[in-house]
Image (cartoon, rainbow, N blue to C red):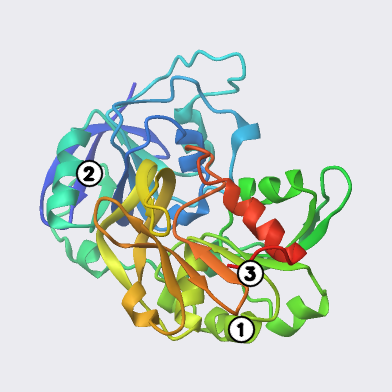
Amino acid sequence: MSTKGYLVLSNGTVFEGRRVGAGIDRVGELVFTTGMEGYIETLTDPSYYGQLVTQSFPLIGNYGIIEEDFEGRSALFGYVCREISDTPSNFRTQYTVGEYLTRHGIPGIVGVDTRQIVRLTREEGVMNAMICSEVPKDLSALAAYTVKDAVRSVTCAAPWTAPAQGPEKYRVTLIDYGLKRNIVRSLQRRGCTVTVVPAQTTAETVLAGDPDGIMLSNGPGDPKENTAAIAELCKLIGQKPLFGICLGHQLTALALGGDTVKLKYGHRGGNQPVRELATGRTWITSQNHGYAVVADSLRGVGEEAYVNANDGSCEGMRYPGLRCMTVQFHPEASAGPKDTGFLFDTFMEMMGGTAHA
């Protein structure tokens, strides 16, 4: 039988619910995702490091946990849901979401008003929160919490290689800042042998492998925290065709002298509209980020290529002459729409010399 639990926000608001998963208390940054499906990918996305994730969709877990669909090593600090099914129905189901949370030491809470939690986050902005068994009298620990050492906590420990599917066309070095596995699979399907390297890998080491192209992965935390990685990117940009996703997009901008800013509540979910400036076409994208590139800070260096159709924030840049393109959204989807998967094809063309950023 579930025990009583609480979600305590740093503004003093308390939501009473029932504990699921690990029975530990945990502080984190409270965020929400609007995805109606894809909770497995959410639970295993390293970009959620240090965060308590609220699912805005009311029923989670109806198709259980399927390990083949994992995107990475679980990194979120807590899970907030209206309801989690304990009787999943799917021929691929292996076990329940509750069991997953317990196995991975993640505290969760159910039976809370997630609609109100999302509204509070939208109105007041991202704030810290705590999943706990008793409401603390002193909330100073909530106020003091910040997400730190995020990339260092989720990057791979050593390089590894994924072979191309079919004949090898190109060799790509993928720098792992907290990657989603479907980035690797998307490259493999297009005939790329992918060498994944840790975030701290030097530019000299990357270039010594003589790859045909370089990819920068997604990842968690404040991009400005990654000073060493930014310094290495300064040496890499322009040397090989380069494609950056999410955190990779932000780090590229910082390496080229641009700026980033923290959004009020970020973009998370598989229904984020992005407008391509060159064509006026709007794409529906999968996203998970709390920071954005300030496009105006890159005038004379890069060209803004995509903007968020809701708030106008930068969603992608092109850097003429540097063979470099970056996007804030996830063209590898998983979970989410596959509308922008063509960007991997553009990257292939860049490596083949038939396309420019």
Local SS, label 1? helix
The residue lying furthest to the front in this view is 279
Q: For residue 232, which numbered disc appears in the image?
A: 1
Q: Which residue is mark 3?
A: 242
In terms of secondary structure, where does tag 3 sit? Answer: strand
Residue at point 15%, 61% (across, down): 138
Q: Earlier in the sequence, mark 1 or mark 2?
A: 2
Residue at x-position 60% and y-position 22%: 94
Indicate which disc residue 7 carries: 2
Decide if residue 4 is on the left or right side of residue 192.
Answer: left
Tell me which label, 3 or 1, sits earlier in the chain: 1
Q: Is 10 located above or below residue 224 in the figure?
A: above
Classify mark 1: residues with Cα within 10 Å, few (<14), some (14-19) or many (20+).
some
In the picture, the quarter occupied by the C terminus is bottom right
Looking at the picture, tell me which residue is in the foreground, 188 or 119.
188
Q: Is residue 127 left or right of residue 355?
A: left
Can the viewer see residue 62 in this picture? yes
Instruction: Say which quarter of the image contains residue 55.
Output: top left
Q: Secondary structure at mark 2?
A: strand
| Residue type at tag 1 | Glu
Relative side of 85 to 344, left or right: left
> Residue 173 in the image: x percent, y percent?
73, 66
Cα separation between marks 3 and 1: 14 Å
